[in-house]
Image (cartoon, rainbow, N blue to C red):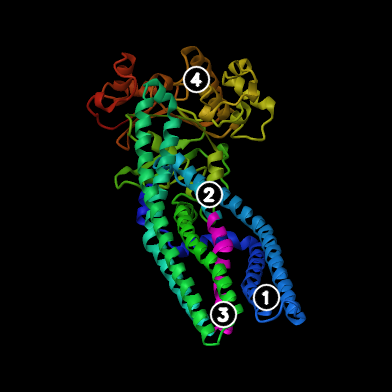
């Protein structure tokens, strides 16, 4: 199931988001609690300020300018007002210091955990997911969580506190005004939440999906730049990206303009609220139930409440947008992949000398998670310790799947695979894969130094060991010609090196890892004929004492294999060594070999193969 299909199948709820948030808040909760307490106390100071502005006015109204009592009352109210304002700012700054430490720890943990989870998703997941889109989802989710946290602490928490506090204060001072204000605040918040959930949320989600598509498409085009240049397809790729960007623009402006309309509605509601509060107070003044200071108190209160109300609509919109942007990172956090270590998994320790059958397929059935069609059904075969095994057959016949199952990149559907007497499903994947050295047909290198790339399987290797491995792989000579030698950075995916140079680095990496099981996926296919000759000799030396599985496309490279398995449609239809298979006139292997020798085909193409013979097992 692709990432987009999974998203359609399951929508992230607010409960999921809060579980995700609490997971990251809990380890540093006291920083968060400290920040929240200081913020609440700061806002409480703000809620009391209107009382003293009203007292200043009441002290002045109805008294002569030189009245000592009025003068003292006015100054007492002023100093209380000034102290509250100072405490408000000081406590707010203290809250932010606590909050920054809290928030940064959370963001670091989220992005680290995001990579941790994604790296351990199955090969099937990665095969169906854009790498650029995944990067975008992780980084966007991290910053969305930052916005989510800030909105709650800096926006909603102070707003709710000030509205509740001031409604209570008004209720004691002017009950009728307090009732009116409290009622309109409740209506305002309810309408804002409804608009955000029912109207804004769907639009923000569509905008976030379009944003992911922009990142994924951009990464795909940039990564494939060599192909773009070789076909002169810059204008065509520009047009493809422009169309994706236009789709994002349409969805983004739709969501943003909807947000502006929602803000306009809330602004009108706030004006009505102000008018009702002031009008009610004037009515009470006329009835002798309010003083001029009360009118100032109400107006000051409204300006404070109005500011928080204006922001609360914005905060709810930001919260909704943050939740939409967090959807993918929350889904990563919640996802449990099919291929993972079980609770009792133990490290795999391979000792080839203690058993004859190092690798054993026992009644293995397998189908990829995204299909219902079986690749293998009841496959059973043993691979001896130290055996040189070759796999041949047309594309799609099951050769690559065979080695992927040995590495446990997928779980078998039926049966089991045993390595040195241990079921691969019961060992840790890290220990399993450390016992297998892979040289792929198209190796991908990291944008790191050549030394780091060669030592990737053994990061503790000394420089002398790295150089020795490079010499065995005939990579030392070209590395020495580079300006920085072994410290040369190879570029993204090794783009600064030729195909043959990348292959030699990959072979050196396999040599240095010194794993008991070696998998070669036509490891010399990118080399010129002279280099291939020497590297074949190096590989022959490397294969001594190791169990080697070679996926062969050019059959001339596997004549010295101890056993050759011929695959067709997920079945092993023939097996034997080169001589025994060539000795049978109706052998599928012989037909393929003869066709390649005559240069009629360069690989086992199913469209050019002869009629399928009966199954032959050559001893």
Residue at 46% across, 13% down: 529
Question: Residue 579 at x, y = what percent?
Answer: 38, 21
Instruction: Say if mark 2 contacts mark 1, CB within 8 Å.
Output: no
Q: Is residue 566 in view from this perspective?
A: no
Return the x and y of residue 209 as percentages of the image width and height: 40, 48
Q: Nearer the viewer, mark 1 or mark 3?
A: 1
- The mark that comes first in sequence, 3 or 4, is 3
Q: Residue 417 lies in what quarter of the image? A: top left
Q: Closer to the camera: disc 4 or disc 1?
A: 1
Q: What secondary structure is the magenta-colored segment mainly?
A: helix
Neighbourhood count class around disc 1 (C-alpha, 10 Å): few under 14, some 14–19, many 20 upward:
many
- Say which residue label 4 marks: 500
**Residue 73, magenta (yes or no):** no
> Marks 2 and 1, how far apart in space?
56 Å
Tag shown at residue 114: 2
Of badges 3 and 4, nearer the viewer stands 3
Residue span colored magenta: 147-174
Q: Is the C terminus in the top left, top right, bottom left or bottom right quadrant?
A: top left
Q: CA distance from mark 3 to mark 4?
A: 80 Å
- Residue 606 lies left or right of residue 328; in this view the side is left
Image height check: is 536 above or below 402? above
Would you call the spot at circle 4 few (<14 residues within 10 Å), some (14-19), or many (20 or more)? some
Which residue has dot 1 on it?
56
Q: Earlier in the sequence, mark 4 or mark 1?
A: 1
Tell me, for residue 170, which label it has, or none: 3
Nearer mark to the viewer, of 2 and 1: 1
Q: Secondary structure at mark 2?
A: helix
* Cα distance between the residues tagged 4 and 1: 85 Å
State how many labels appear: 4
Q: Position of residue 80 (x, y in %)?
A: 72, 73
Mark toward the start of the polypeptide (1 vs 3): 1
């Amino acid at each position: 199931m692709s990432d987009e299909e999974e998203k359609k199948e399951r929508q992230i709820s607010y409960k999921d988001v809060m579980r995700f948030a609490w997971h990251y808040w809990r380890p540093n909760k006291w920083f968060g609690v400290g920040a929240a307490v200081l913020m609440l106390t700061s806002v409480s100071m703000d809620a009391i300020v209107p009382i003293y502005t009203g007292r200043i006015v009441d002290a002045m109204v109805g008294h002569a300018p030189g009245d000592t009592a009025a003068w003292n009352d006015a100054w007492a109210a002023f100093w209380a007002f000034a102290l509250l304002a100072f405490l408000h700012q000081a406590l707010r700054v203290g809250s932010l210091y606590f909050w920054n430490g809290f928030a940064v720890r959370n963001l670091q943990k989220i992005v680290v955990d995001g990579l941790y989870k994604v790296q351990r998703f199955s090969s099937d997941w990665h095969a169906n997911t854009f790498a650029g889109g995944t990067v975008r989802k992780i980084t966007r989710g991290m910053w969305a969580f930052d916005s989510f946290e800030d909105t709650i602490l800096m926006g909603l928490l102070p707003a709710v506190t000030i509205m509740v506090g001031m409604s209570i204060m008004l209720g004691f001072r002017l009950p009728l005004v307090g009732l009116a204000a409290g009622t309109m605040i409740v209506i305002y918040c309810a309408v804002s939440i409804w608009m955000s959930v029912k109207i804004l949320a769907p639009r923000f989600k569509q905008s976030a999906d379009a944003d992911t598509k922009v990142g994924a498409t951009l990464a795909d085009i940039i990564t494939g730049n060599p192909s773009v240049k070789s076909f002169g397809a810059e204008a065509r790729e520009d047009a493809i990206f422009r169309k994706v960007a236009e789709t994002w623009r349409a969805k983004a402006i739709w969501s943003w303009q909807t947000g502006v309309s929602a803000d306009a509605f809330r602004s009108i509601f706030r004006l009505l609220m102000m008018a009702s509060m002031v009008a009610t107070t004037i009515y009470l003044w006329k009835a002798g139930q309010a003083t001029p200071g009360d009118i100032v108190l109400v107006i000051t209160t409204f300006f404070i409440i109005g500011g928080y109300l204006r922001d609360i609509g914005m905060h709810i919109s930001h919260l909704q947008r943050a939740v939409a942007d967090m959807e993918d990172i929350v889904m990563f956090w919640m996802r449990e992949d099919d291929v993972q270590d079980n609770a009792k998994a133990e490290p795999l320790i391979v000792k080839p000398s203690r058993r004859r059958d190092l690798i054993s397929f026992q009644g293995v059935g397998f189908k990829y998670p995204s299909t219902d069609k079986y690749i293998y059904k009841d496959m059973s075969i043993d691979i001896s310790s130290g055996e040189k095994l070759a796999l041949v057959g047309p594309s799609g016949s099951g050769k690559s799947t065979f080695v992927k199952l040995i590495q446990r990149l997928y779980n078998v559907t039926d049966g089991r695979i045993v390595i040195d007497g241990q079921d691969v499903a019961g060992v840790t994947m890290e220990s399993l894969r450390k016992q297998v050295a892979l040289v792929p047909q198209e190796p991908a290198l990291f944008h790191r130094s050549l030394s780091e790339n060669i030592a990737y399987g053994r990061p503790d290797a000394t420089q002398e060991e790295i150089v020795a491995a490079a010499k065995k792989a005939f990579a030392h000579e070209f590395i020495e010609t580079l300006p920085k030698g072994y410290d040369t950075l190879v570029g993204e995916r090794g783009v600064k090196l030729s195909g043959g140079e990348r292959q030699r680095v990959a072979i050196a990496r396999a040599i240095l890892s010194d794993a008991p099981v070696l998998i070669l996926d036509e490891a010399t296919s990118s080399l010129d004929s002279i280099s291939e000759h020497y590297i074949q000799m190096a590989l022959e030396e490397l294969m001594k004492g190791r169990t080697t599985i070679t996926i062969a496309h050019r059959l001339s490279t596997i004549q010295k294999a101890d056993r050759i398995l011929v695959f067709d449609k997920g079945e092993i239809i023939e097996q034997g060594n080169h001589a025994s298979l060539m000795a049978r006139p109706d052998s599928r292997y012989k037909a393929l070999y003869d066709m390649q020798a005559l240069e009629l085909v360069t690989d086992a193409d199913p469209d050019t193969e002869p009629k399928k013979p009966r199954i032959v097992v050559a001893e």
